[in-house]
C-alpha cells in the first residue's frame, strides 16, 4: 500500500492506494484547503499562518497514514513552495512536526507526473496512439504536457498561471466586474501565446484536464452533491458549457457560490480565474471540448515508483 501527498498552492491532498498488476486501487483520498500560496506571488515567501494551516493538515494525514498498512510514503510540494524564498525553512518545519522529508517538484517534473496519472485514467478509452494534451491547472501554476496516450511525452511546459495567482492579480470583488474578467482573460491569452507553441496539429488532439479546477467544474456540471471521482472521470465538457458556467459563477457573490452544488468549499473565490485559464487553454489549442479525469500527479507518483522498483 502506497501513500502519496502533495502540498499545492491551494490544497494539500493525500492518496492511499494499492497497485496491483499496474492497476491503481484507491483506499483513501483526502483534501484540505489550506491556501498555502496566499500572497506568495506578492510577498515572495510563505506566510506563517498559511504554513501553520498546512502543517496541521499534514499532522492529520500522519495519523491517517499511521493507521493503515502503508509500505511507502511520499510527500511532494509544487508551485507555492518552489517559488517561495523560505521554502527551506518550511521543509525544516515539516521535518520537525511530522517527520517527513518533502520533495519539491520542478515544473517539468510536475507536468510529466500529471501526464502519467492522466494517461492511466484516460488512455484506455482513447487507444494507444492518440495525440493527447494534458493540462493541470493548479493554484500557482499550470502544467501542460503534449504526448501520446501510450504514455510517450513529446513536450512539457510549466506556466505561472494558477487560479490563486490570477485571482490575486486580477480579481478584487465578487461578483467579478466585466472589466476584471476581460483583463484576466486577456492576460491568460497573452501568456499562453508567449509561452506555449501553437501546435498546428493540436486540433486533432484530445485535450484532457486534471486538477481541482477541472474536477470542480465537472462536479458542478454534473450536480454532484457528494463528490465522486468515478462519476467525474472521462466526462466530456464543451467550451460553451464551461463559458456559461464561468459567466454564471462570476455574477454571484461568494456566499451564493458557496451554495452551488458541486463547488468544493474553499474554491469559491478562485473558480472564476481557474475556469478562465481552462477556457484560455481550450482556445489556444482550438479544442471545442475537454475530457476531465480525476487522476494526476498523485497517481503518477505511485506509478512512477512502481516503474523504478
Image: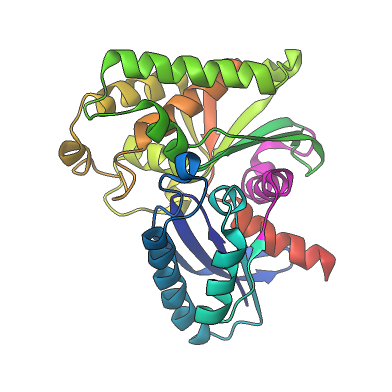
Horizontally, residue 121 falls left or right of residue 268, namely right
Position in image of residue 82 (x %, y %): 62, 51
Residue at the (48%, 14%) spot, across then down? 186
Image quadrant occupied by the N terminus? bottom right
Image quadrant occupied by the C terminus? bottom right
Position in image of residue 293 (x %, y %): 54, 44
Which is nearer the eye, 104 or 149? 104
* 29 falls in the magenta region: no
Residue at the (67%, 48%) spot, across then down? 110
Position in image of residue 85 (x %, y %): 58, 52
Which is nearer the eye, 42 or 7? 42
Horizontally, residue 123 falls left or right of residue 280, namely right
Specify whether residue 133 is in view: yes
Position in image of residue 197 (x %, y %): 73, 19
Q: Give above or below for 281 relative to 209.
A: above
Horizontally, residue 145 falls left or right of residue 188, namely right
Which is nearer the eye, 249 or 206? 249
Q: Give above or below for 27 relative to 180.
A: below
Specify whether residue 33 is in view: no
Horizontally, residue 82 falls left or right of residue 32, namely right
Residue at the (35%, 30%) spot, across then down? 272
Residue 176's image quarter? top left
Residue at the (46%, 79%) spot, across then down? 64
Q: Give above or below for 54 relative to 263.
A: below
Find the magenta span and give its range: 104-129
- Colour treatment of the image: rainbow
Amino acid at each position: 500500500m502506497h501513500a502519496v501527498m502533495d502540498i499545492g498552492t491551494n490544497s494539500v491532498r493525500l492518496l492511499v492506494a494499492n497497485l496491483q498488476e499496474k492497476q491503481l486501487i484507491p483506499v483513501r483520498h483526502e483534501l484540505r484547503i489550506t491556501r498555502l500560496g496566499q500572497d506568495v506571488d506578492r510577498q515572495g515567501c510563505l506566510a506563517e499562518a498559511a504554513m501553520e494551516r498546512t502543517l496541521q493538515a499534514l499532522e492529520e494525514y500522519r495519523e491517517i497514514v499511521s493507521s493503515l498498512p502503508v509500505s511507502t510514503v511520499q510527500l511532494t510540494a509544487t508551485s507555492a513552495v518552489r517559488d517561495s524564498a523560505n521554502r527551506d525553512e518550511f521543509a525544516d518545519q515539516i521535518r520537525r512536526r511530522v517527520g517527513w522529508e518533502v520533495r519539491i517538484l520542478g515544473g517539468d517534473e510536475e507536468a510529466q507526473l500529471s501526464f502519467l496519472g492522466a494517461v492511466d485514467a484516460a488512455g484506455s478509452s482513447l487507444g494507444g496512439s492518440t495525440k493527447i494534451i494534458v493540462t493541470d491547472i493548479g493554484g500557482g501554476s499550470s502544467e501542460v504536457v503534449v504526448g501520446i496516450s501510450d504514455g510517450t511525452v513529446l513536450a512539457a511546459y510549466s506556466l505561472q498561471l494558477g487560479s490563486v495567482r490570477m485571482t490575486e492579480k486580477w480579481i478584487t470583488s465578487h461578483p467579478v466586474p466585466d472589466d476584471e474578467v476581460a483583463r484576466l482573460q486577456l492576460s491568460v491569452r497573452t501568456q499562453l501565446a508567449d509561452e506555449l507553441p501553437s501546435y498546428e496539429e493540436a486540433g486533432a488532439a484530445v485535450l484532457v484536464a486534471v486538477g481541482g479546477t477541472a474536477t470542480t467544474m465537472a462536479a458542478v456540471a454534473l450536480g454532484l452533491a457528494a463528490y465522486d471521482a468515478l462519476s467525474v472521470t472521462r466526462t466530456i465538457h464543451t467550451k460553451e458549457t464551461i463559458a456559461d458556467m464561468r459567466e454564471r459563477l462570476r455574477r454571484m457573490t461568494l456566499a451564493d457560490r458557496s451554495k452551488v452544488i458541486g463547488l468544493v468549499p474553499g474554491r469559491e473565490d478562485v473558480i472564476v480565474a481557474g475556469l478562465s485559464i481552462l477556457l484560455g487553454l481550450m482556445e489556444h489549442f482550438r479544442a471545442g471540448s475537454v475530457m476531465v479525469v480525476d487522476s494526476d500527479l498523485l497517481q503518477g507518483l505511485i506509478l512512477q515508483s512502481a516503474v523504478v522498483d
